[in-house]
Amino acid sequence: MNYLVDIHILKFGLVGIMGMGIDFATTWICKEKWAFNKFLSNSIGFTLAVINNYLLNAYWTFGNSSHTSHMQLLFFLIISIVGLCINNALLYIFLRYINNRFYLLKIIIVGLVFFWNYSINYFVTFR
């Protein structure tokens, strides 16, 4: 890997950690305090994290604020929606067949979906 890719993945990871905090806090509030369905709560948390992550990745990680466009946002949203589908599908499967520890599984799944999100955004959205 070259130096630029290393910096991008480090920044993408830091943004992802911040997004994960937003995701988990929002999911917890929706699920535990407001008694929303766990998949709806997961989707709301994920969506708020995606908005945060797009803005930070566009302007900080990939530093292409002069190139941001509606198409770039559209690509990021489509990739994130696919990531959300993967996230919810894995959450459903893991909860049903492996374990009933919602937040532990959510951490594992966030890690798995990170690789999808980074790879596709690096090669498509922010190329």
Image (tube, rainbow, N blue to C red):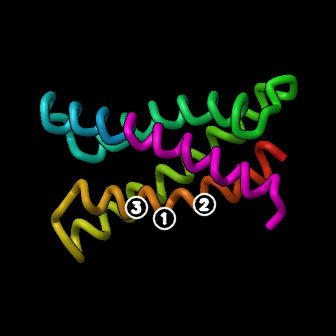
Earlier in the chain: of badge 3 and badge 2, it is 3
Question: Which residue occupies the extreme bottom position in the image?
Answer: 98
Highlighted range, magenta:
1-22
At a point 72% along the width and 50% down the height, the residue shown is 7
Q: Are marks 1 and 2 in contact (CB under 8 Å)?
A: yes
In the image, which disc is placed on residue 109?
3
Identify which amino acid the numbered label 2 is placed on.
Trp
Q: Which residue is mark 1?
A: 112
In the image, which disc is placed on residue 121?
none
Q: Which class describes the residues within 10 Å of circle 1: few (<14), some (14-19), or many (20+)? A: some
In depth, the one of 78 and 28 nearer the eye is 28
Q: Are marks 1 and 3 in contact (CB under 8 Å)?
A: yes
Q: Which class describes the residues within 10 Å of circle 3: few (<14), some (14-19), or many (20+)? A: some
Where 88 falls versus 28 (above or below)? below
Q: Are marks 3 and 2 in contact (CB under 8 Å)?
A: no
In depth, the one of 69 and 57 nearer the eye is 57
40 falls in the magenta region: no
Q: Quadrant of residue 70?
A: top right
At a point 35% along the width and 57% down the height, the residue shown is 107
Identify which amino acid the numbered label 1 is placed on.
Leu
Identify which amino acid the numbered label 3 is placed on.
Ile
At a point 63% along the width and 28% down the height, the residue shown is 55
Q: Could you tell whether 63 is left or right of 36 in the image? A: right
- Of helix, strand and loop, which mostly describes the magenta segment? helix
Q: Which class describes the residues within 10 Å of circle 2: few (<14), some (14-19), or many (20+)? A: some
Q: Which residue is mark 2?
A: 116
Which element carries disc 1, helix, strand or loop? helix
